[in-house]
Image: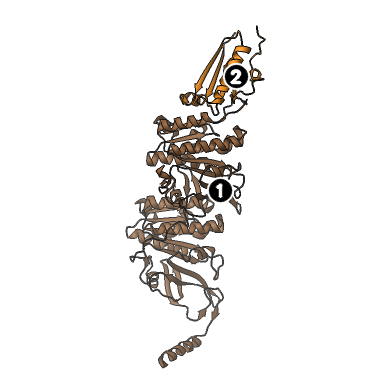
Chain colours: A brown, B orange
Amino acid sequence: MSSSTAPIEKLPTGIPGFDHIANGGLPRGRTTLVSGTAGSAKTVFAAQFLSAGIQQFDEAGVFITFEESPDALRRNMVGFGWDIATWEAQGKWAFVDVSPQPDAEELVRGEYDLGALLARITYAVRRVNATRVVLDSLGAIFTRIDNSQLIRGELLRIVSAMRGMAVTAILTAERTQEYGEIGRYGVEEFVTDDVVILRNLIEEEKRRRTIEILKFRGTSHQKGSFPFTVIPGEGVVVIPLSAIELKQRSSNLRTRSGNDDIDRMCGGGFFRDSIILVSGATGTGKTLMATTFLASGAAQGERVLLFAFEESRDQLFRNATGWGFDFESYEQNGQMRVICNYPEASSLEDQLITIKKEIESFRPQRVAIDSLSALERVSTMKGFREFVIGLTSFIKHQEVVGLFTSTTPTLLGGTSITEAHISTITDSIILMRYVELFGEMRRGLTVLKMRGSAHDKEIREFIIDGNGMHVGKPFRTISGILSGQFTHTAPSEIERLGNLFKDDSSSI
Amino acid sequence: MSIIVLQLFIAGRTPRTEHAIATLRQLIEERLIGHPCELVIVDVLTDPQQAEERHILATPTLIKMSPLPQRRIIGDLADADGLLAALSLPPLSPA
């Protein structure tokens, strides 16, 4: 056969994100083992492989079910928007029903093989002219037939027959633990060259689904495990975080922050396609900064989107009105969308998908998230880091300016996990800190980083009044603001130090 | 007295298939004399639709369609002893 020397082609599955980590899709014409523990979404993944084939590529599929009855599958998959019954009527989907029949008791007398199964699979593939085949699941075959030697031989026969029919197949298999043997029957690895593992982990009492391509013999794929989620109306969505390439465009176009003082400090405003992190303790004015940023965009006729995880819509709108911004009317004329959510309402993976979907459908020029750190508490460190990377790289591809706020855990000084994770990803960082000055709490602000531009490096005092934020003079007589360990320096000392350097430079 | 209907599903003509058919014929001729008996042989390679309808997984598979209750036996019937009992058919003494 000439195909044995030809490079291995990939069949795009159409499962969101999966083709990305699979470097194109599943190896075409082969059978891939999809292994996972109970509840790891194997059947959904398999059914989606067929559904996406029909919906996106007009490729027919055959579903060989050993476990659930076709009726149960039709019912269970409706929630994902897959109308299997209609596809069956259109000749795009065929079931081979090998599920246990309650009325048919079987006795074994003598030798047998699975010739009937193979004949039925072949028949179904020919009947709908299938490109894709699913066998779900291996474990159920073993419970029905108590002869693993026979099953191993017969599976090899079926897999090679399917190769002969040039179909791309998925064989699902159960495993008893998340890490360990690929499958529980010890035959799985021998049957296929390609193995994908689905996991449903519990980490720090939080459920996390991940997918890992263990091997694709003779062809490439992304290494390591990637988070995924199962969404009603969509099915499996893989989040290819570390597989994201750093090829986002960057623009020299500047957008106004809404505050002239901040614009000046940033060297003329924020860059478009950039991410700004605003970090500060509670009450330092982060939400005001986000509000001003969005309002200024809306005032210029831009579409703006706000994800609020700390305050309700009413609170936000009331506060905005207090600063003189009419969010209500922006929302009514379709320029603004506000999405308020409790971080605990869904998993971080789902939040990420929601945010992506909102950005894709609303197509805003400005996006604010208030606050990113609120999402920290619903996830593990690793999960949160992946979320932030996924989110920032997505936003950077969308030609929007993103402003994220992050609350520091301590009132004075301090950094948060959010900063540690995203400071290298963001283009600009603005720190807002409380400054204790002779028995009074003042607020200080500095632009810590402004990628690709000069910026003001001083820590300036700012005040908030009824008109918003006003940035004033630098704190000259105080140091240690960022660490929260203030020391006051006498003005005469500053003068002396200043003169010292002046003398040095002039003497050279 | 109801008619006995047996269906034997095979996958092509193999020695295993031949063995099952021979065993079954012998059983009918020797042990079910006097009972109207119908044996239908279905080759799943030429008639896969039948296999699909009856949910046949293994070959050979023997189904006793009537009298009820239905019975299914998979294998080449190498072990003919007790086959009638397995089929819930009355073992008759030769006339």
Protein chain holding label 2: B
For the residue pair A105 and A185, the one nearer the viewer reads as A185
SS class, disc 1? strand
Residue A41 image offset from top left, x and y in percent: 53, 43
Label ID, residue A199: 1
Residue B42 can be seen in this image: yes
C-alpha gap between disc 1 and disc 2: 50 Å
The dot on residue A311 is: none
Using the image, tell me which numbered label, if any, was put on residue B23: 2
At label 1, which amino acid type do we have?
A: Arg
Q: Position of residue A505 (x, y in %)?
A: 42, 89
Count the marks: how many? Answer: 2
Q: Quadrant of the C terminus of chain A?
A: bottom left
Nearer mark to the viewer, of 1 and 2: 2
Residue B58, above or below A257:
above
* Horizontal relation, residue B50 to residue A292: left or right: right
Q: In this rendered view, identify the residue nearer to me: A416 or A148.
A: A148
Q: Chain of mark 1?
A: A
Position of the N terminus of chain A, as image quadrant, is top left
Q: Residue furthest front?
A: B15
Q: Amino acid at mark 2?
A: Thr
- Name the residue furthest top: B95
Q: Are marks 1 and 2 on the same chain?
A: no
Q: Nearer the viewer, residue A327 or A147?
A: A147
Residue A490 versus residue A72 in the image, above or below: below
Residue A73, percent across and down?
50, 34
Q: Residues within 10 Å of mark 1 (few under 14, many from 20)?
A: many
Task: Assess disc 2: are there few (<14), some (14-19) or many (≥20) residues with their C-alpha within 10 Å of its C-alpha.
Answer: some
Element on which disc 2 rests = helix
Picture layout, residue A212 above or below residue A129: below
